Amino acid sequence: MPRRARKKSSSGIYHVVLRGINKQRIFEDDQDNQKYLETIKAYKDASGYQVYAYCLMSNHIHLLMKEGKEDLGIAFRRIGASYVYWFNWKYSRRGHLFQDRYKSEVVETDRYFLAAMRYIHQNPLKAGIVKEIQAYPWSSYGEYTKKAEICDTRFALSLFSSNSIEALYLWEKFNQKNNDDYYLEYDDGTRLNDLEAAELIRNITGLKSPSEIQNFEKQKRNDVIKKLKHRGLSIRQIERLTGVSFGVIRGILN
């Protein structure tokens, strides 16, 4: 069956998500994240796209961008081929890294543009990886508050005010605001690795070590375990990180 043609955005702006094939990790360390950002930057002139926001997660990527002189599909093939060649060389692997077809939504209003940007910047926060969005090093939040390297920050800021100081203040306030936004995402049952899961547990509980959950009062412990399962941790992973037995965890979740 032929694939359905992508809906074209009248503004040329899209919220794009790319993911690893078979849900695998596409970034193993900080060097990988940096390399991908350098690759996006390197092809901006050739493809003519503009980037307004990004967030690199362990096995997927969010981008808010405007199509340029080349179709985004061609741009992503350029970016992907370059990054995958480097990634495969680094890790002595072969084959595909990204899922063939990226996912995209059209962005045709200023309101939707800003809400999608906020969603992208809050991705690590809502995943429980950080407590503050500015603490995550692999999103474009810092490009607005510190120095722009990849993003065109002027457009988003201009939607708040013509005064640069006021615009940045209002932009930060908007991006930090609690919300229930739900935008383009992969409902793929993604699992956090143990380091990410341990950080999630520390953020939820305030504990220094996930194993300290064993010292919680029973009801509080049970509530935390249910929350961790809801966030995507497996029973075995919860057992491994907290020291609470598999049988006890299964009993709590039944």
Image (spheres, rainbow, N blue to C red):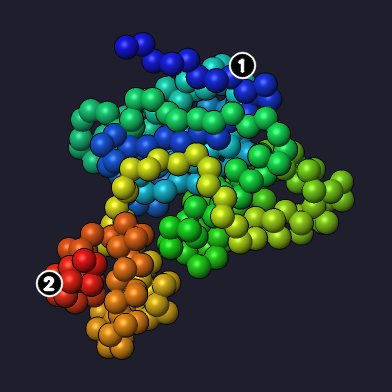
- Residues at marks 2 and 1 touching, judged by CB atoms closer than 8 Å: no
Residue at x 25% of width, y 79% of height: 211
Does residue 121 appear anywhere in the picture? Answer: yes
Q: Name the mark nearer the viewer: 2 or 1.
A: 2
Q: Secondary structure at mark 2?
A: helix
Residue 209 in the figure: left or right of residue 145: left
Density class for disc 1 (Cα within 10 Å; few <14, some 14-19, many ≥20) is: few
Residue reaching furthest front? 254
Residue reaching furthest right? 163
Vertical comparison of 28 with 130: above or below: above
Vertical comparison of 67 with 165: above or below: above
Residue at x 42% of width, y 35% of height: 18
Density class for disc 2 (Cα within 10 Å; few <14, some 14-19, many ≥20) is: few
The amino acid type found where label 2 is placed reads Gly
Residue 64, position in %: x, y?
58, 37
Residue 213 in the figure: left or right of residue 126: left
Please give the residue where the numbered disc 1 appears in the rendered image: 69
Vertical comparison of 53 with 122: above or below: above
> Which of 197/78 is in front?
197
